[in-house]
Amino acid sequence: MELNFSKRNRTLIIKIDGEIDHHTCEILRGEADCALEKMGGKNIIFRMGGVSFMDSSGIGAVIGRYKITQRLGGRIAVAEANDRVQQIFRLSAMQSLIPSFPNVDSALEYVEGGKE
């Protein structure tokens, strides 16, 4: 798994390429939490177009970041999810908590603008 971090305003954008599984989710959790704290942000956007596999550990990592953003008064979203990730979100009913958007700009409008 490869992670690339960027920020816009108070939003951490995490581009993920590769597999999110029980071997890599600890890295995702740790690095995401550290980057969010370091930047003083409150929102997270996961760019998941390059995710080739995600198991229940990956779902747990995303849900954990959801809980953190909620405590900070922020929001979380997914952008650029491929068909595989979208199916996982549908099957796990995660889309009811974490909305998915076709691109980062739409996700930013949601997390920063508060639009449903």
Image (cartoon, helix red, strand yellow):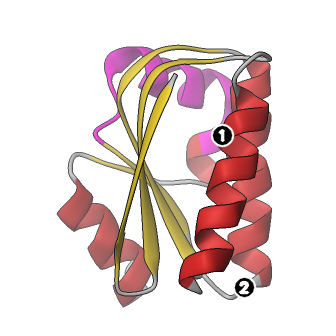
Q: Is residue 71 left or right of residue 49?
A: right
Which residue lies under the disc numbered 2? 72
> Which one is nearer the viewer's eye here, 96 or 3?
3
Q: Is residue 58 left or right of residue 85?
A: right
Q: Is residue 26 left or right of residue 91?
A: right
* Callout 1 amino acid: Leu
Q: Is residue 8 left or right of residue 93?
A: left
Name the residue rendered at 39%, 84% in the picture: 112
User: Does the segment drawn in magenta span residue 84?
Assistant: yes
Place of residue 63 in the rendered image (x, y in percent of width and height, measured from the top left): 74, 48
Of the two numbered discs 1 and 2 on the same chain, state the one appearing first in sequence: 1
* Callout 2 amino acid: Leu
Task: Say which quarter of the image contains residue 41.
Answer: bottom right
Q: Secondary structure at mark 1?
A: helix
Q: Is mark 1 in CB contact (under 8 Å) with mark 2?
A: no
Which residue lies under the disc numbered 1? 28
User: Does the segment drawn in magenta span residue 1?
Assistant: no
Q: Secondary structure at mark 2?
A: loop
Q: Quadrant of the C terminus?
A: bottom left
Q: Which residues are magenta?
A: 80-94
Place of residue 94 in the rendered image (x, y in percent of width and height, measured from the top left): 64, 41
Task: Say which quarter of the image contains residue 35.
Answer: bottom right
Place of residue 42 in the rendered image (x, y in percent of width and height, measured from the top left): 59, 81
Residue 28 visible at all: yes
88 relative to 41, above or below: above
Q: Main secondary structure of the magenta part?
A: helix
104 relative to 23, above or below: below
11 relative to 94, above or below: below
